[in-house]
Image (tube, rainbow, N blue to C red):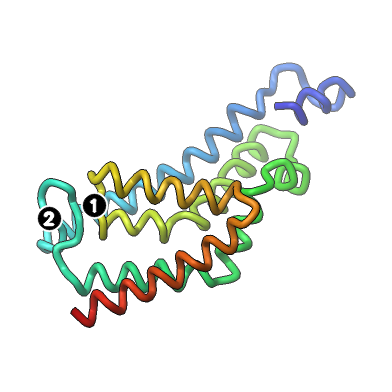
Amino acid sequence: ARVHRHERAKGTLPQTFTPTAAFVAGYLLTWLGFSVAATAAQFGLDAAGQITGMTLSSASRWLSASVLVAAGLYQFLPWKETCLAHCRSPAGFISAHWAADPAGAVRMGAVHGAHCVGCCWALMALLFVGGVMNLAWIAVLAILVLIEKLAPAGRTAGVVVGALLIAWGAATIAV
């Protein structure tokens, strides 16, 4: 909104265009797509008897181990760090991807949303392990995402969590 106000003050944009709403719409559309995919996975896992009733957590040690190890390995991938870099610096993202038209603002929002989904999807998949309806587990994962995005040592925390998730997954298979 601030960038738009600046551009409008210079007279380079029409007064009627509201890029913030268009940007948010694109961002939310990306998250809607992720939510639909996660819901489909939940229904599929439920139908296959792989998640339990009340908390919707994994009923299979193989499912749990697979998700834990996959989420742990994802913490080490360069793509995760690339996505986090965009999420950590939204102003930098906007200045690099600025588009002055409504379609461009929607596209910017969708791309920024894709970066945010890209840095968080594997951690969110851990909800299938600890329970989609387990508020304590949700809080732990939310705090982890917050630390990764905002804390000065966020990258280090992510790597430590990745190693712990891999170890937890290996222990789950071994038991």
Q: Give residue 33's position: percent from left, percent from top.
A: 41, 47
Residues at circles 1 and 2 in contact by the CB criterion of under 8 Å? yes
**Which residue carries the number 1 mark?**
131
Q: Amino acid at mark 1?
A: Gly
Q: Looking at the image, which is closer to me, 24 or 121?
A: 121
Q: Secondary structure at mark 2?
A: loop
Q: Residues within 10 Å of mark 2 (few under 14, many from 20)?
A: some
Q: Residue at x 52, y 62 (%)?
A: 158
Q: Is residue 124 left or right of residue 158?
A: left
Q: Give residue 57's position: percent from left, percent from top.
A: 20, 55
Q: Is residue 129 left or right of residue 51?
A: right
Q: Looking at the image, which is closer to me, 96 or 53?
A: 53
Q: Which badge, 1 or 2, is on the more N-terminal residue?
A: 2
Q: Is residue 8 left or right of residue 42?
A: right
Is 28 located above or below residue 71 in the figure? above
Is 96 located above or below residue 103 in the figure? below
Q: Amino acid at mark 2?
A: Thr
Q: Secondary structure at mark 1?
A: loop
**Which residue carries the number 2 mark?**
52
Q: Residue at x 23, y 44 (%)?
A: 133
Quarter placement of the N terminus: top right
Single out the residue that lies furthest toward the top.
15
Q: Residue at x 41, y 42 (%)?
A: 32
Q: Residue at x 75, y 27 (%)?
A: 2
